[in-house]
Image (cartoon, helix red, strand yellow):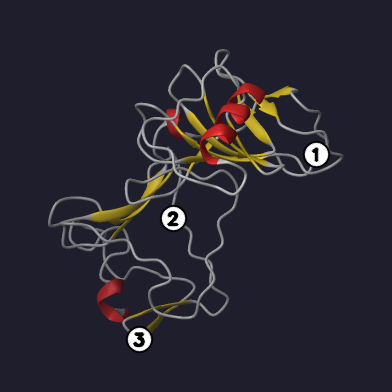
Amino acid sequence: MAELVAELAKKIGNTGGTISGELVIRDSKGLNISTWGSISAGTDGHVLMGQNCYKHPTKNTYHFKNTHENIGAKGIVFMLGMEGVYIFDTGSRATTADEEFTPKIHRVMTEKGGNFGGHVHIYGNGSENLALVGADHVFMQFFRDGVTNGRSGYIGYPGAAAPNLEIANLVPNGYISINAPDGLHIRGHKIPRTIRSTSAPNSVDGEDGDVWHQYV
């Protein structure tokens, strides 16, 4: 790196200047920007813009840039062959210069999607704090036991041109519970806490018989 700086000084001097042609930085910790910033890359094609960190040029590992008692490291990563932009943040922690660490990298949410780890809070005061927009159907899914164990339920319009808003619980022996202190209102009418059917259940009325015709 010292040799590179010396050569650059010959070309552009200490007050700046212009380089015509390609500038290649190879087999080093990357390009340093002041004390804490750097741009670096490995042979895997991933590029890191880091605060107090760099990517090893041949091992493809991540390392702290400086020794500090609590600054930690943050980075923006562009991964070869993968869509989107990725980030990591170690949080406050002690670092030792050139020490290797393994960041927990997350994809940034973009128009192509992405994943979040942790809680998401949406603050706002309006009618469109969260809008789910589809072409001919849209719904929100729930995975109670993780993605690999399958979908547990959903709310929305599940099929192309589906006219009905569906609330579905797909967990075996599960049901849908609506818990409201003042009861449930449908089309402005309050549904009583206890519903008794006045006729035998049938395929039209369902298990509650014609009581729904009375209150809805």
The quarter of the rendered structure image containing the C terminus is bottom left
Label 1 vs label 2: CA separation? 45 Å
The foreground one among 112 and 70 is: 70
Q: Would you name the residue on which mark 1 appears?
A: 93
What is the three-letter code of the residue carrying label 1?
Arg
Mark 3 and mark 2 lie on one chain; the one further toward the N terminus is 2
Question: Three-letter amino acid code at disc 3?
Answer: Gly
Q: Mark 1 or mark 2: which comes first in sequence? A: 1
Q: Marks 3 and 2, Cα distance to the nearest angstrom?
A: 21 Å
- Image height check: is 174 above or below 196? above
Residue 42 placement (x, y as % from top left): 51, 21
Query: Any mark on residue 188, and which?
Result: 3
Q: Whole-Å distance between the Cαs marked 1 and 3? A: 56 Å
Residue 39, visible in the rendered structure: no
Q: Which mark is residue 11?
A: none
What type is the residue that disc 2 sits on? Answer: Ile
Secondary element at image label 1: loop
Spot the residue most to the top: 59
Is residue 213 toward the left or the right of residue 32 in the image?
left
Q: Which mark is residue 176?
A: 2
User: Is 107 placed left or right of 170 in the picture?
Assistant: right
